[in-house]
Amino acid sequence: MHTYTPQTFNLPELEGLSEKQIKAHIGLYEGYVKHINVLREQIVGLETLDKEKYAYAIMETRRRLGFEFNGMRMHEYYFTQLEGGASPLDTSSALAGALTEKYGSVDDFITHFKSVGMSRGIGWSVLYADPAHNTVHTAWVSDHELGQLGGLPVILAMDMWEHAFMVDYLPAEKKSYVEAFLKNVNWNVVAERF
Ligand SMILES: [Fe+2]
């Protein structure tokens, strides 16, 4: 069986996000990588033991696959966006064009993306590309998996779980975390994904 191993991220010093915060968050990411392996081992283990007897346990374990897998993958999008240091979006890039076409301007997109990020609950504000229709979509994803848009590439992923900011910010300061996160995005990485 294929085993996943955690990625390492080459992160610079970030503005408004402490090293302690990032270190704790990467630790959680590594937990998702561990658990995607554990979950798959458990399904196979239960199936080998007695497929019929453990049918419910197998089904319920399988139901968690999207949570653990996306928990791993979404964090990989999250941390790689911060690699290389903050860099603005090239206004002549294809992504800037797509954002302007859909949202009026890049600034209007940012305002929209932030407001989606401020949705109540834990999850992600996600910008996707829809290559078949040459456009983009912003969606709220609850947990790590509920509301993901099938098959669309993730372009920008903002973690809105409290674990992403509670070392540095209080729950009521979620807005400040959003500002800090966006301040540190390397938009070259984001534009390249698009
Ligand atoms: Fe997270």
Image: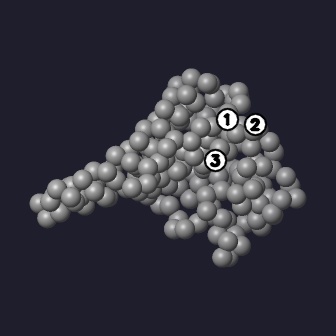
In the rendered image, the residue lying farthest to the right is: 92
Residue 183 image point, x, y percent: 72, 37
Q: Viewed as shown, does residue 5 lie left or right of 18?
A: left
Q: Is tag 2's residue or tag 1's residue first in the polypeptide sequence?
A: 1
Q: Secondary structure at mark 3?
A: helix
Q: Viewed as shown, does residue 8 lie left or right of 191?
A: left
Q: Is tag 2's residue or tag 3's residue first in the polypeptide sequence?
A: 2
In the rendered image, the residue lying farthest to the front is: 1
Inspect this view and state whether residue 182 appears: no
Per the image, the residue denoted by label 1 is 10
Residue 83 image point, x, y percent: 70, 39
Location of residue 51 with respect to 87 vertically, above or below: below
Residue 33 image point, x, y percent: 45, 44
Per the image, the residue denoted by label 3 is 114
Q: Nearer the viewer, mark 2 or mark 3?
A: 2
Quadrant (top left, top right, bottom left, bottom right) of the N terminus:
bottom left
Inspect this view and state whether residue 167 appears: yes
Per the image, the residue denoted by label 2 is 85
Q: Is tag 1's residue or tag 3's residue first in the polypeptide sequence?
A: 1
The residue at 28%/57% (across/down) is 44
Cβ–Cβ below 8 Å for labels 2 and 3?
Answer: no
Q: Nearer the viewer, mark 1 or mark 3?
A: 1
Q: Amino acid at mark 3?
A: Lys
The image quadrant of residue 13 is: top right
